[in-house]
Image (cartoon, grey):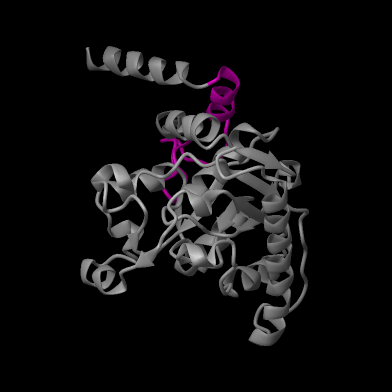
């Protein structure tokens, strides 16, 4: 009886996904074992549960447009390096969804998440099964050796939690992704997201309250906390995602920060230029 119910639920979920997208998910090779998991707990089959809401957000809520998505290599290791915005990490979800449903052949994007994510009950298991990985250098090396497509946000919390007066101003980039690229010979595809800054425009960050609650930030927006839980919903802004041409770097991964920082600046500048292009091309925040 339970098996029959499960089959009916699975069938209904699959019906909510375009057939070609389901075929992409079903045939995805993540190097999983006989039980359907890879070493990090990713289960491609699990995507049929998380893909429908992600695709709905992508297609109908944020109405995402992509540019240059063919710049993601068809196969082999690659680092997607993006700006990080919007208070909640929906930008990462939209980048991953773009690579899954708008790229032919599709790529499974593995996002590097914060180290505290595994401490979250229930959520941590969902993240792992959906392909997210704790952002350590060793985890990234393993994925790249397996030909993975990894998404990193060098700005980290500095980018996603900034207030709106700093919108589209790139914050300081960490150097770790570049040292990883140099050590593994992995190409870097710069990625720019335009639109996410306005999904939760933050007027003020109550740092003392965030620290008390153990949160990275406690944003005050025009709707939150004034409208309660409803005010925490992101606004239906329009996303524009730009994928730049792959960049390759050579050198010693243990070189001094000044040298590695010069390489990082090239990536940062490529992202900045695509952000400027996106701001010039869009007609407004919501269309």
- Is any atom of residue 204 visible in this view? yes
Q: Locate residue 238, reporting x and y percent.
A: 56, 40
- Is any atom of residue 189 visible in this view? no
| 237 sits left or right of 192 in the view | left
Along the viewing direction, whichever of 230 and 47 lies nearer the viewer: 230
21 drawn magenta: yes
Along the viewing direction, whichever of 8 and 168 lies nearer the viewer: 168
Give the residue drawn at x 75%, y 41%: 70
Along the viewing direction, whichever of 238 and 285 lies nearer the viewer: 285
63 drawn magenta: no
| 160 sits left or right of 109 in the view | left
Residue range of the region highlighted in magenta in the rendering: 18-44
Give the residue drawn at x 44%, y 36%: 36
Compared to residue 222, the image places residue 98 above or below, namely above
Magenta stretch secondary structure, dominant: loop
| 39 sits left or right of 284 in the view | left
| 104 sits left or right of 167 in the view | right
Q: Locate residue 193, reporting x and y percent.
A: 60, 51
Along the viewing direction, whichever of 205 and 36 lies nearer the viewer: 205
Give the residue drawn at x 78%, y 53%: 245
Q: Quadrant of the C terminus?
A: top right
Which image quarter: residue 172? bottom right
Q: Locate residue 35, reporting x and y percent.
A: 41, 35
Q: Quadrant of the N terminus?
A: top left
Q: Locate residue 42, reporting x and y percent.
A: 44, 43
């Amino acid at each position: 009886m339970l098996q029959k119910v499960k089959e009916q639920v699975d069938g209904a979920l699959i019906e909510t996904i375009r057939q070609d997208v389901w075929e992409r998910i079903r045939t995805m090779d993540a190097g999983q074992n006989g039980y359907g998991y890879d070493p990090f707990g990713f289960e491609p089959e699990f995507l049929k549960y998380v893909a429908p809401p992600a695709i709905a957000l992508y297609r109908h809520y944020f109405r995402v447009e992509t540019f240059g998505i063919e710049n993601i290599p068809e196969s082999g290791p690659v680092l997607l390096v993006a700006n990080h915005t919007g208070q909640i990490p929906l930008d990462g979800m939209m980048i991953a969804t773009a690579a899954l449903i708008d790229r032919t052949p599709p790529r499974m994007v593995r996002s590097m998440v914060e180290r505290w994510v595994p401490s979250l009950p229930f959520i941590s298991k969902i993240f792992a099964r959906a392909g997210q990985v704790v952002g350590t250098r060793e985890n990234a090396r393993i994925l790249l050796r397996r030909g993975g497509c990894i998404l990193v946000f060098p700005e980290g919390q500095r980018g996603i939690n900034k207030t709106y007066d700093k919108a589209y101003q790139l914050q300081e980039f960490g150097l770790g992704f570049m040292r990883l690229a140099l050590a593994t010979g992995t190409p870097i595809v710069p990625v720019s997201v335009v639109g996410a800054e306005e999904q939760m425009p933050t007027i003020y960050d109550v740092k003392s309250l965030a620290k008390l609650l153990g949160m990275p930030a406690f944003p005050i927006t025009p709707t939150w906390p004034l409208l309660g839980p409803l005010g925490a919903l992101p606004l239906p802004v329009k996303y524009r995602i730009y994928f730049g041409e792959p960049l390759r770097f050579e050198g010693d991964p243990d070189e001094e920060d000044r040298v590695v920082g010069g390489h990082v600046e090239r990536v940062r500048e490529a992202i900045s230029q695509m952000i400027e292009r996106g701001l010039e091309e869009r007609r407004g925040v919501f269309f």
